[in-house]
Image (tube, rainbow, N blue to C red):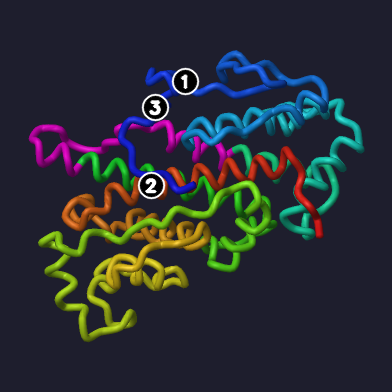
Amino acid sequence: MGHSPSRRRTVICSSGISRPCPLTVDGDAVLKSDVEPVRSRSHLEAIHFPMIPATETLEAALKAWYYFLRERGVHPGRYDQKTSASDDAYQAILDRFRAFSDQHSTGREYLHTVLVALAKGTRLVKAALEWEEASAGSKATRSRILTSRARGEQWRLVMAYGGLETVGKALLCLRCKTKGLGLADATAFHASFRCGLPAYTPLVAPDRCRAELARWLKTEAPLDERQSPIIAFLKMQDDGTSFFYRWAVKGQSVGSWPAAIQLAKELRNATAHGSLSATKVGQWGLRDALDTLCMNLGELTAGALRGLVEGLPTA
């Protein structure tokens, strides 16, 4: 589900003690650092995915995907090297990819390019999730510390969205697309494995009573999206702009996984293009939303990997 904001991403067990969250293999709890490669399909099918924070969820899904590949003689991180994997093994991988898009081609070289893109994207999302207490900038004064933390959350989301987009384009066979994931792409990506994710927990709009945001909103009342001062200030102009406008300006919650991807894309673009400053993030109260969206992207990436491991219906 969509995670509520949390600055310290730990797991509180039923005993009330914070500790690393375990995976379960054949019913036995094991810490993720203790898991060894699974050597049989029966073991692979016995891997369960408990409802745990995004960082641990992604770690579990990534390990399970690596097990799937190793079982077939394909070694993660060494896709460009000769392998003993059989043609049947590569066909099994292709079948998993085609559950996301029937446009995937045959051939080992092609499959290697998809595997590499998938690995790069997943690692980038994982790095973003593991960047706790993200900060970028001066810590000379309290105000600068707060601004640096806001900037850190911005770039953490940039990393997470970049990784998710790489994964999505690889699985949807959109690697030649120059723009980000549009709504149709995000919807298709989520629809491919929607059974693996719960209903999205709505992301509420920023607090419209915050003084600086309220000052901007006063100028918005008689205008529409095309004339919006905030949209113009942030230089937003692609197909995802309306999601940010409805959320930040109109105060409407984001209520679905594809919509969350679109909002994350807009905030990523505004940050990467330099139009959304860390100061504005703090003044408008966006930090918690940035954190939540980062977690959401981690959950989506984990969901895609789960779909690859468990196999998806190809109706």
What residue appears at the point 60 percent right and 18 percent down from the top-left corner? 29
The picture places residue 297, in percent across and down from the top left corner, at 49, 47
- Relative placement, left or right, of 38 versus 198 is right
Q: Residues within 10 Å of mark 3 (few under 14, many from 20)?
A: some
Q: Main secondary structure of the magenta part?
A: helix
Query: Mark 3 or mark 2: which comes first in sequence?
Result: 3
**Which three-letter amino acid code belongs to the residue tagged 1?**
Pro
Query: Mark 3 or mark 1: which comes first in sequence?
Result: 3
What element does badge 2 sit on?
Answer: helix
Residue 292: mark in rendering: 2
**Which three-letter amino acid code belongs to the residue tagged 2?**
Thr
- Image quadrant in which the C terminus is located: bottom right
Q: Which residue is mark 3?
A: 10
Total numbered badges shown on the rendered structure: 3
The boundaries of the magenta stretch are 120-147
What residue appears at the point 78 percent right and 55 percent down from the top-left corner? 104
Residue 128 magenta-highlighted: yes
What element does badge 3 sit on?
Answer: loop
What residue appears at the point 54 percent right and 36 percent down from the top-left corner? 51
Residue closest to the far front: 15
Name which quarter of the figure residue 117 lies in: top right
Name which quarter of the figure residue 85 lies in: top right
Name which quarter of the figure residue 15 lies in: top left
**Spatial separation of the CA atoms under disc 3 and disc 2:** 15 Å
Residue 20: mark in rendering: 1
Query: Mark 2 or mark 1: which comes first in sequence?
Result: 1
**Which three-letter amino acid code belongs to the residue tagged 3?**
Thr
